Image (tube, rainbow, N blue to C red):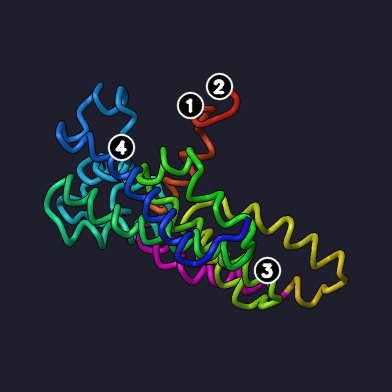
Amino acid sequence: MALRFKAVLALALLASLISFAKFSHCQGTTWATPDQYIHACYSDLPSLFSERGLDKNQWPYTSDTNAVEYPVLTGMVMFATAALVNSPIAYFNINAIFLALLFIGLALLIRKMRPELSYLLPVAPAMIASLYINWDLWAIITMMLAIYWFDRKAYAYSALAIGISISTKFLPIFLLLPIAFILWRQNQMRALVKYFVTAIGIWLAVNLPFMVTTPTGWWRFYKLNLERGADWGSIWLA
């Protein structure tokens, strides 16, 4: 079922508003416990604003033990938006605006890629339930752009997007496996090498300044993920 542009836009806007209504319940209690868990409106956005020193304009990777638990591009989004506000509620709201725009853009991108599936994302209950829980949409939209450009054989743009995406969240690195397999199967070894060199080069260009200036704070995200066990987001505990 292919939907028109306006229909996808309307569905995505409606979904983002419904999700915001769910999360905004916690604004009345400033995300106090146990209210934020009872009403399923917990969000990293206001929590990390104060817990990681963003409310004091602290550089996200300065602390060896309390650096933000996100890769550097997400950390920069967190830092930049914190500079614009002075309260957890305002911080949540400004980030929610950006996330809603990303969500709408993602829905429209999917419509361009697969028009017949364009309705699935805006009506997905999991998407509505978790839209404003963290900054992951910054990684998801760049990952989808990598897929979009790869399908159109714009490999340079795809590699650029995946390098940025991995600098935003580590999950997109797994996309490199099917990309490598497809190019290898098509006997495009030169394109495969160029793709990986470009993606790694972009990742290094983004990360190297942080690796050199604040190595322990930069490494904290990777260390936490290497050491963490299964949590409530894992199928292991389903």
Q: Earlier in the sequence, mark 3 or mark 2?
A: 3
What label does residue 196 carry, if any?
3
9 lies above or below 221: below
Measured from the top left, where is residue 198 in percent x and y? 62, 74
Closest to the observer: 105 or 15? 15
Q: Does the residue at mark 1 contact the one at mark 2 (Cβ under 8 Å)?
A: yes
The answer to whether residue 72 is seen in the rendering is no
Side of 234 relative to 81 (left or right): right
Q: Disc 1 or disc 3, which is closer to the eye?
A: 1
What label does residue 232 carry, if any?
1
| Helix, strand or loop at mark 3 | helix
The three-letter amino acid code for the residue at tag 2 is: Leu
Side of 3 relative to 135 (left or right): right
The three-letter amino acid code for the residue at tag 1 is: Trp
Tell me the residue at 48%/38% (across/down): 125
Q: CA distance from mark 2 to mark 4?
A: 25 Å
Circle 2 residues within 10 Å: few <14, some 14–19, many ≥20: few
The three-letter amino acid code for the residue at tag 4 is: Lys
Query: Which of the 4 quarters of the picture holds residue 173?
Result: bottom right
Please state the extent of the stretch shown in magenta in the rendering: 194-214
Q: Report which residue position mark 2 lands on.
A: 237
Tell me the residue at 15%/34% (across/down): 28
What label does residue 199 carry, if any?
none
Q: CA distance from mark 1 to mark 2?
A: 6 Å
| Helix, strand or loop at mark 2 | helix
Q: CA distance from mark 3 to mark 2?
A: 35 Å
Task: Work out which residue is located at the far left of the displayed protein and give it.
Answer: 86
Q: CA distance from mark 4 to mark 1?
A: 20 Å
